[in-house]
Image (tube, helix red, strand yellow):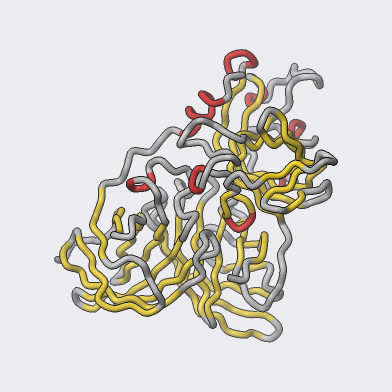
């Protein structure tokens, strides 16, 4: 049993675990799944998403775990594992109510080309000549209140280009309100809609699936999970970017009446309302455009970080010690990528925060994180 444990593992709780074996330690991201290996879910981990760090002592792994704000579980604890073989792990003791007791190595499923699925979903592609870019992240202010049109939620936001990821789009096309479409039903397991369920639903603040909880009130306004998104609200949306053919090639002869850039289908929306509660727990955005789910447990900070493309570029775990430093805090710990994403780096980070709504770091790929919303679980 001298092999490397890095890879994809399936727990007897039916969750999928992306394990990284690095310098004598085991790190993982564990995501709930309702289909085998989560292959039929756009958003695995909506019921629970946990992180783990453990130290190898012979064939025993002694470690701690914590649920992150993405998912409905607010637990944490200690779990010790035995490496039964290079393809089997078993829990020998645990504190905190961890649901899994054994894990077996699994093959990585084939990645779905989601961009192709977007083009198939949007039938206007052949009529209007749209070109699809990769996933985008748009942060800005709502300028038109959301409404429901043909089952989809539509709204416009004014992007903050400095905080947004809009690949290949000329500045003149985003220096105006950006139309956004949140689909109701997509008819696809690979594209979420707000009327769809759980891992195939659009996510709202703190990574919670909408699950059809959208109400159109008599004045025409829309409430998502009981929340009205009014003009002036600061939001952050993730989705797929499209434009009329030629726009992404910076076409000089484009006329002002041409179709503008469209963000849609949108698959997640966060209302930005950071609250400093004396804890770092919440949903955060990195200046690498990733989304980070932080959980502070006493003097320990955990996070699960996912890149803008659903974690395909990078997915990481952080575990660090929180200490008071004057009027703020300092966090020193390790950041390790797991094989959900393509990048496989590791680094030591020192983070500082003066107000619990912003973190800055001296190392790693992201240098600054800003709190999007609070989660007190």
Query: What residue lies at 50% left-to-right and 43% top-to-bottom?
Result: 200
In which quadrant of the rendered view does residue 354 lie? bottom right
Question: Image quadrant for the N terminus?
Answer: bottom left
Residue 125 seen in the current view = yes
Q: Give the residue drawn at x 66%, y 66%.
A: 374
Quadrant in the picture for residue 134: top right
x 39%, y 75%: residue:
64
x and y percentages locating residue 245 in the rendered image = 63, 19
Is residue 131 shown above or below 327?
above
Badge count:
0
Q: Residue 158's x, y, as percent?
A: 78, 42
Q: Residue furthest front?
A: 218
In the image, is residue 370 above or below residue 61? above
* On screen, residue 204 above or below 242: below
Relative vertical location of residue 51 with respect to residue 309 in this rendering, above or below: below
Which residue is more in the foreground, 181 or 284?
181
Does residue 157 show up? no
Residue appearing at x 52%, y 58% in the figure: 365
Query: Relative to the observer, which residue lies in front, 352 or 228?
Result: 228
From the top left corner, tell me how far across and down residue 325 is, in percent.
Answer: 64, 84
Q: Quadrant of the C terminus?
A: bottom right
Q: Position of residue 65 (x, y in %)?
A: 41, 72
The residue most toward the top is: 127
Out of 336 and 231, give the one closest to the viewer: 231
């Amino acid at each position: 049993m001298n092999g490397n444990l890095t890879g994809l593992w399936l727990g007897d709780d039916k969750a999928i675990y992306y394990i990284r074996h690095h310098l004598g330690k085991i790190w993982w991201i564990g995501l709930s799944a309702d289909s085998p290996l989560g292959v039929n879910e756009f958003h695995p981990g909506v019921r629970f998403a946990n992180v783990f760090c453990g130290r190898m002592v012979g064939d025993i792994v002694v470690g701690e775990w914590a649920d992150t704000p993405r998912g409905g579980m607010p637990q944490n604890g200690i779990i010790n594992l035995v490496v039964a073989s290079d393809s089997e792990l078993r829990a020998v003791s645990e504190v905190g109510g961890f649901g899994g007791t054994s894990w077996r190595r699994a093959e990585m499923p084939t990645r779905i080309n989601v961009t192709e699925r977007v083009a198939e979903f949007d039938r206007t592609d052949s009529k209007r000549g749209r070109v699809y870019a990769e996933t985008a992240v748009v942060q800005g202010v709502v300028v038109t209140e959301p409404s429901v049109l043909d089952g989809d939620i539509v709204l416009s936001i004014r992007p903050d280009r400095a905080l947004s990821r809009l690949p290949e789009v000329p500045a003149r096309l985003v220096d105006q309100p950006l139309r956004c479409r949140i689909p109701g039903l997509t008819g696809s397991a690979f594209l979420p809609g707000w009327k769809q369920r759980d891992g195939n639903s659009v996510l709202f603040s703190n990574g919670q699936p909408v699950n059809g909880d959208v109400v159109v009130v008599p004045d025409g306004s829309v409430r998502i999970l009981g929340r009205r998104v009014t003009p002036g609200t600061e939001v952050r949306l993730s989705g797929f970017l499209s434009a009329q053919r030629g726009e992404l090639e910076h076409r000089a002869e484009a006329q002002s009446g041409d179709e503008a850039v469209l963000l849609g289908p949108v698959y997640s929306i966060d209302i930005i309302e950071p609250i400093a509660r004396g804890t770092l727990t919440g949903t955060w955005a990195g200046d690498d455009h990733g989304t980070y789910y932080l959980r502070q447990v006493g003097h320990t900070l955990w996070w699960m970080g996912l890149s803008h493309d659903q974690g395909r570029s990078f997915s990481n775990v952080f575990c660090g010690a929180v200490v008071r430093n004057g009027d703020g805090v300092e966090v020193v710990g390790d950041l390790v990528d797991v094989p959900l994403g393509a990048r496989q780096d590791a680094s030591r980070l020192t983070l500082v925060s003066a107000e619990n709504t912003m973190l800055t770091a001296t190392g790693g790929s992201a240098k600054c994180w800003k709190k999007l919303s609070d989660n007190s679980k």
